């Protein structure tokens, strides 16, 4: 646990931050694209945070949120491309986009390693995303100054 | 310890905002996002509840307010913030609770 954390009201409270100080943020996306606004709100929040000079330690995709990570989505040309938007943001700012492995398996989100492991004929993970475990969410909770959830 | 509460449900859909307001503490901020912004409509179902919230700042996300055509229909005292303002609220408060 970082030394600057204080214990108050029986729970860990992160240190009070000065106004302009860059903050380490974690973002959790719990809903899939197009069905719910959460993926859009999370993206716009991430862009605004980066514009303000804050660090995004990790974006964790959980439950139906893992559907943000398929590179096979083909939305109409005049609509936003939610996956591509994440991938481009990740490339530009070197973001860590992590997909929960158990949620991904249930929904058919595969990388090459998972494809081999399960004997599947294809994979669909988009550039910039990686599949890993819930430990990555716990780590984000410990390492980040703030963890913000977007879901239904 | 000040908390930021985000509420993304319409008060016509469920009672998330009501539950939230029962738990807020002095100095907390409630940010209405997505369909949550319907709670801030003047004369609406939750307008009175919002006006009654003492010692709590109520904000609404401008993009979601505009997307629903509510810009000139909000309860007095509700502060409209953009995504940059959302980020500031997250960093200025001690933690963020999403009422999902």
Image: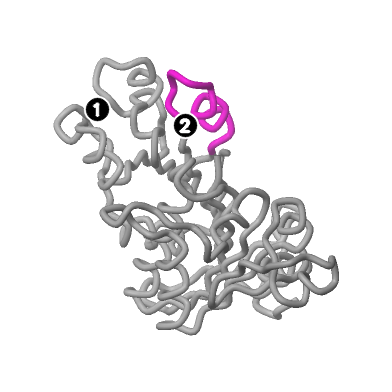
For image coordinates 18% across by 36% down, the residue present is B71
Residue position for label 2? B9
Q: Position of residue A47 (x, y in %)?
A: 37, 68
Residue at the farthest front position: A121
**SS of the residue under disc 2:** loop
Q: Which residues are magenta?
A: B9-24
Q: Is residue B73 magenta?
A: no
Chain containing mark 1? B
Chain containing mark 2? B
Residues marked 1 and 2 touching at CB (< 8 Å): no
Q: Is residue B13 above or below residue A17?
A: above
**SS of the residue under disc 1:** loop
Residue position for label 1? B75
For image coordinates 61% across by 67% down, the residue present is A124
Give a yes or no on whether discs 1 and 2 share a subunit.
Answer: yes
Label 1, label 2: how far apart the Cα atoms are? 17 Å
Left or right: A151, with A52 as reference point:
right
Q: Nearer the viewer, residue A147 or B89?
A: A147
Q: Nearer the viewer, residue A143 or B94?
A: A143
């Amino acid at each position: 646990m970082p030394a600057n954390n204080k214990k108050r009201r029986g729970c860990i409270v992160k240190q009070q931050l000065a106004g302009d100080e860059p903050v380490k943020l974690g973002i959790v996306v719990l809903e899939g694209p197009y069905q719910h606004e959460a993926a859009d709100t999370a993206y716009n929040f991430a862009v605004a945070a980066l514009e303000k000079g804050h660090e995004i330690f990790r974006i964790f995709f959980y439950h139906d949120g893992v559907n943000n990570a398929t590179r096979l989505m083909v939305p109409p040309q005049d609509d936003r491309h939610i996956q591509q938007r994440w991938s481009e943001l990740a490339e530009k700012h070197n973001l860590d986009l992590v997909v929960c492995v158990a949620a991904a398996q249930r929904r058919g989100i595969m990388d090459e390693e998972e494809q081999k492991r399960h004997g599947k004929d294809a994979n669909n993970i988009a550039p910039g995303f990686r599949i890993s475990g819930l430990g990555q969410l716990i780590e984000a909770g410990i390492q980040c100054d703030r963890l913000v959830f977007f879901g239904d | 310890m000040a908390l930021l509460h985000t509420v993304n449900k319409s008060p016509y859909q469920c009672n998330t905002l009501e539950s939230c307001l029962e738990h807020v503490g002095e100095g907390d901020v409630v940010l209405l996002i997505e369909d949550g912004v319907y709670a801030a409509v003047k004369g609406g179902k939750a307008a009175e509840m919002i006006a009654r919230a003492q010692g709590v700042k109520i904000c609404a996300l401008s993009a979601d307010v505009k997307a629903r055509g509510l810009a000139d229909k909000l309860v007095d005292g509700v502060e409209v913030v953009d995504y940059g303002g959302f980020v500031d609220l997250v960093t200025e408060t001690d933690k963020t609770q999403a009422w999902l």
